[in-house]
C-alpha cells in the first residue's frame, strides 16, 4: 500500500510552510537558548561544539529525514505508525516499542521542561518590573538562587506552563498548533540578533568566539561526547516521535529532505547565535562558563540591565523564550495524546487533561530537586539531573538509533523511494548509506566510549 493514500484522523497542516514552522517551533526551544550554552560551558567549549555539529550533520539530519518520512507514511501516533509500518515491512510487531519509548521520553522530558520554562515566565515579570536595571552580577545571581529556593513559586509557574501547553494541544493541529507558531519564531530570532549586537560591543566578543569555536580536545571527556550527541537529538526533537507525529500531518506532495534541511539549519543557527550572544557577556563580566543550568538566567539579565532599552528588550526576550518553550512542549506530549485518542477512544480534550495532570505531578519532582530535595541523589544526580541525563543522553539516542536501523535495514527500498519521491538519486543513496551504517555506528561507538568500554575492547 502506498503511504500516500493514508490520511491522519488528527488533521493536516495547511501548507508546507506551516509544517516547517511547526517543526522548527518544536526544535527551537530551551534546548537552544538555555541548554546548549550551559552544556557547552560545562564541557569546555570548542571541542564540545565541534562534536555537537558533527553529530547534527551525520546523525541528526539523516534521522530527521527518516522520522518525518515514517510519520508521513504511517499517519498515526508514533506507536501505531510503527505498528503499521512494521507490518507493511513484514517485520516484528516489537517495533512498536520504539513508539512506546518515545511516548515515555516525551512525558519525562516535558515534566522538567515545564519547570525550566516556568523560570522564563518568572523572568518576564522580574525583567518587566525592572529588577535587573543596573544590577551587578552578584545581584543577578541572587535573584536566580532565590527563585530556585522557592518551591511555591516554581510550582506556580510550572502549573501555568503545563496548562498553557495542554490548552494548545487540546485545540488540535490547526486550531492550536498552527496558530501558535507562525509569528513567534521570527520574532525570537530578531531579539537574538539584538543581543548578539550587544555582545559584539561587550569587549569580550572575540574571547567568547574563541571559547565556542577553538576546539581544545583536552577539555572534553568521554561523557562530554555523549552529552554532545544526546544534545543533537534533544535540540532537533528527535528520537521520541515528536517530529514523527508532526510529519504525519504533512501534506503528501511536499519534499521531505528539503524541508528537513531547513529545520536543522534553523535550529543550529539559533543555538550558535545564542552561544555567541551569551559567552562574550560571561567573559566580559568575569562569570563562570560552567555555571550550569542557571547560565542564561545569570548572564542575559545582566546585559539587559546595562543596555539602553534593556527593560523592553529583556522583557520581550523572556516572553519569546517562553513561547519557544511552548511550541516545543506541545510536540513533547502530542504523541501520547494522539495515542489516547486512537486507542482509548478519548476526546482530544480529555486526553490532554490526563496527560497534563500526569506530567504536572512528575514535574513536582524537578521542582523539589532544586530546593527541598537538592541533596537527594541517585548516581550522584538530583532528580532533575537524572531525568535530563536519562532522556537526552540515553533514551533519545537509542530512539534515534532504532529509527535509523528500521529505515536503513527493515523498510523496503520501494517504500522509502515512494515516500521520498526524489529526483536526486545520489542524495537519496547518501542518506540511505548514512542511516544504514554511519548513524548506528556513531551512536553505538559514543555509547561505548562514554562507559569506558570502548577503551577496554580496543586495548
Ligand atoms: N527540541 C526542543 C528544544 O531544543 C526540546 C524537545 C525535545 C522537543 C524532544 C520535542 C522533543 O528545546
Image (tube, rainbow, N blue to C red):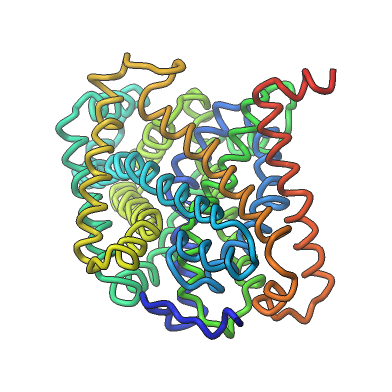
Task: Tell me where residue 161 appears, x and y as whole percent.
Answer: 24, 50
Say whether residue 415 is left or right of residue 120.
right
Q: Nearer the viewer, residue 142 or 304?
A: 142
- Quarter location, residue 206: top right
- Quarter location, residue 326: bottom left
Q: Residue at x 64, y 57 (%)?
A: 63
Say whether residue 137 is left or right of residue 81.
left
Against 270, is 169 above or below?
below
Q: Residue at x 34, y 22 (%)?
A: 138
Q: Nearer the viewer, residue 237 or 85?
A: 85
Say whether residue 76 is left or right of residue 360.
right
Q: Nearer the viewer, residue 39 or 247?
A: 247
Task: Tell me where residue 136 appears, x and y as whole percent.
Answer: 34, 26
Task: Tell me where residue 413 appears, x and y as whole percent.
Answer: 75, 71
Q: Can residue 92 be spotted in the picture? A: yes
Q: Residue at x 52, y 27 (%)?
A: 289
- The C terminus: image quadrant: top right
- The N terminus: image quadrant: bottom right
Against 46, is 307 above or below?
below
- Tag count in the figure? 0
Task: Tell me where residue 375 appears, x and y as whole percent.
Answer: 32, 14
Against 378, is 365 above or below?
below
Q: Can residue 202 be spotted in the picture? A: no
Q: Residue at x 51, y 81 (%)?
A: 251
- Quarter location, residue 215: top right
Amino acid at each position: 500500500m502506498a503511504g500516500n493514500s493514508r490520511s491522519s484522523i488528527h488533521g493536516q497542516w495547511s501548507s508546507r510552510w506551516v509544517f516547517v514552522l511547526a517543526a522548527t517551533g518544536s526544535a527551537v526551544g530551551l534546548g537552544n537558548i538555555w541548554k546548549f550554552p550551559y552544556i557547552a560551558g560545562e564541557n569546555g567549549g570548542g571541542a564540545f561544539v565541534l562534536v555537537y555539529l558533527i553529530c547534527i550533520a551525520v546523525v541528526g539530519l539523516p534521522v530527521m529525514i527518516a522520522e518525518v518520512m515514517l510519520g508521513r507514511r504511517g499517519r498515526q501516533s508514533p506507536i501505531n505508525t510503527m505498528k503499521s509500518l512494521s507490518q507493511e515491512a513484514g517485520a516484528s510487531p516489537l517495533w512498536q516499542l520504539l513508539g512506546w519509548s518515545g511516548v515515555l521520553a516525551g512525558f519525562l522530558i516535558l515534566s522538567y521542561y515545564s519547570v525550566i520554562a516556568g523560570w522564563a515566565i518568572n523572568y518576564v515579570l522580574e525583567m518587566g518590573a525592572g529588577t535587573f536595571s543596573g544590577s551587578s552580577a552578584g545581584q543577578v545571581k541572587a535573584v536566580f538562587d532565590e527563585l530556585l529556593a522557592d518551591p511555591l513559586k516554581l510550582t506556580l509557574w510550572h502549573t501555568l506552563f503545563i496548562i498553557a501547553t495542554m490548552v494548545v494541544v487540546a485545540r488540535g493541529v490547526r486550531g492550536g498548533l498552527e496558530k501558535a507558531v507562525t509569528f513567534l519564531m521570527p520574532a525570537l530570532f530578531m531579539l537574538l540578533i539584538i543581543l548578539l549586537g550587544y555582545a559584539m560591543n561587550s569587549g569580550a566578543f572575540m574571547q567568547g568566539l574563541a571559547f565556542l569555536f577553538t576546539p581544545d580536545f583536552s577539555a572534553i571527556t568521554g561523557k562530554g561526547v555523549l552529552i554532545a550527541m544526546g544534545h543533537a537529538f534533544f535540540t532537533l526533537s528527535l528520537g521520541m516521535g515528536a517530529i514523527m507525529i508532526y510529519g504525519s500531518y504533512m501534506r503528501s506532495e511536499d519534499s521531505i529532505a528539503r524541508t528537513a534541511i531547513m529545520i536543522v539549519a534553523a535550529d543550529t543557527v539559533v543555538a550558535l547565535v545564542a552561544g555567541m550572544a551569551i559567552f562574550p557577556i560571561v567573559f566580559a563580566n568575569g562569570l563562570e562558563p560552567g555555571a550550569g543550568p542557571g547560565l542564561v538566567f545569570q548572564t542575559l539579565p545582566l546585559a539587559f540591565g546595562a543596555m539602553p532599552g534593556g527593560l523592553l528588550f529583556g522583557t520581550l526576550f523572556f516572553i519569546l523564550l517562553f513561547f519557544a518553550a511552548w511550541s516545543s512542549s506541545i510536540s513533547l506530549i502530542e504523541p501520547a495524546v494522539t495515542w489516547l485518542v486512537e486507542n482509548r477512544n478519548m476526546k482530544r480534550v480529555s486526553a490532554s487533561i490526563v496527560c497534563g495532570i500526569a506530567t504536572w505531578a512528575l514535574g513536582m519532582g524537578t521542582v523539589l530537586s532544586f530546593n527541598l530535595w537538592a541533596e537527594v541523589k541517585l548516581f550522584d544526580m538530583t532528580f532533575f539531573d537524572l531525568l535530563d541525563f536519562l532522556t537526552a543522553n540515553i533514551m533519545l539516542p537509542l530512539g534515534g538509533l532504532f529509527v535509523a536501523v528500521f529505515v536503513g535495514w527493515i523498510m523496503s527500498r520501494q517504500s522509502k523511494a515512494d515516500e521520498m519521491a526524489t529526483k536526486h538519486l545520489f542524495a537519496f543513496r547518501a542518506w540511505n548509506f548514512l542511516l544504514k551504517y554511519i548513524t548506528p555506528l556513531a551512536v553505538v561507538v559514543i555509547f561505548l566510549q562514554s562507559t569506558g568500554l570502548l577503551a577496554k575492547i580496543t586495548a
